[in-house]
Image (tube, rainbow, N blue to C red):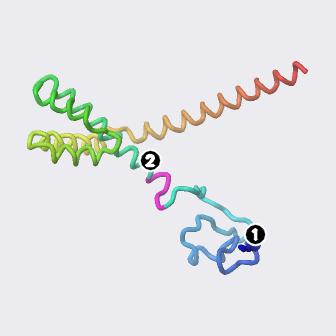
Amino acid sequence: MESSATLPLSQLPFVYPATPRSNKAYPFWPCKRRSSQPTRLHCNKMYVPGFGEASPEAKAAKNLHNFFTYVAVKIVAAQLESYNPEAYEELIEFLGRHSLNDGDKFCAAMFRESSRHKNLALRIMEVRSAYCKNDFEWDNLKRLALKMVTESNTRLMTEYVLETSHVESEK
């Protein structure tokens, strides 16, 4: 038979105390004690559970990395369509057989296809890098993401208030 006991965290101070004694002992702890109020914590960042080894920002960066590959393929395809229709057809045919969900796997598979595909893969990686470094509007991304979250939250709260106040007024 199995048995288990549940102890409050306050009884386990050496395993993981509710509040660390200093940030030096817990460098990953994003909170600092305020000297005027020793029991309160001042946190600079939220703790986001459930992301394993990577932070939410690392997950977003990986998604952007794959998105930059997608953008680079679109740019290269548009360029090829106008000046090298044969290479354009090869790229489109390759796209039909390989997923762009993982940009690195896509480029690795393209490298191994043929010497012509290798040149296309090199061009895609060059464009991906240049787009990321020079053309992607990072400030605009942050502004748009914040705007979308704010507008979405406002819309959802408004819909909920209208829905719940309407139901209560009918009763």
Residue 39 badge: 1
Q: Residue furthest right?
A: 171
Residue visible at 39% across and 49% down in the picture: 62
Q: Is residue 74 magenta?
A: no
Residue 130 sits above or below residue 52 on the image: above
- Kind of element beneath mark 2: helix
Question: Where is residue 98 shown, x and y percent of the image?
Answer: 27, 38
Q: Residue furthest front?
A: 1
Residue 166 sits above or below residue 133 on the image: above
Q: Residue furthest top?
A: 170
Which quarter of the figure is the N terminus placed in? bottom right
Quick check: marks 2 and 1 in contact, CB under 8 Å?
no
Residue visible at 29% across and 41% down in the picture: 69
Question: Where is residue 60 shown, x and y percent of the image?
Answer: 44, 47
Task: Look at mark 2 in the image and give the residue it sits on.
Answer: 60
- Circle 2: residue type: Ala
- Kind of element beneath mark 1: loop
Q: Is residue 55 magenta?
A: yes
**In this orientation, which residue lies closer to the viewer: 157 or 1?**
1
Q: Which residues are magenta?
A: 53-58
Q: On the picture, is 31 further left or further right than 58? A: right
Which quarter of the figure is the C terminus placed in? top right
Q: Quadrant of residue 37?
A: bottom right
The crowding category of the residue bearing disc 1, from other C-alpha atoms within 10 Å (few below 14, some 14 to 19, many at least 20), is: few
Residue 83 sits above or below residue 14 on the image: above
- Circle 1: residue type: Thr
Mark 2 and mark 1 lie on one chain; the one further toward the N terminus is 1
The crowding category of the residue bearing disc 2, from other C-alpha atoms within 10 Å (few below 14, some 14 to 19, many at least 20), is: few
Q: On the picture, is 140 further left or further right than 168? A: left
Question: Where is residue 131 shown, x and y percent of the image?
Answer: 28, 40
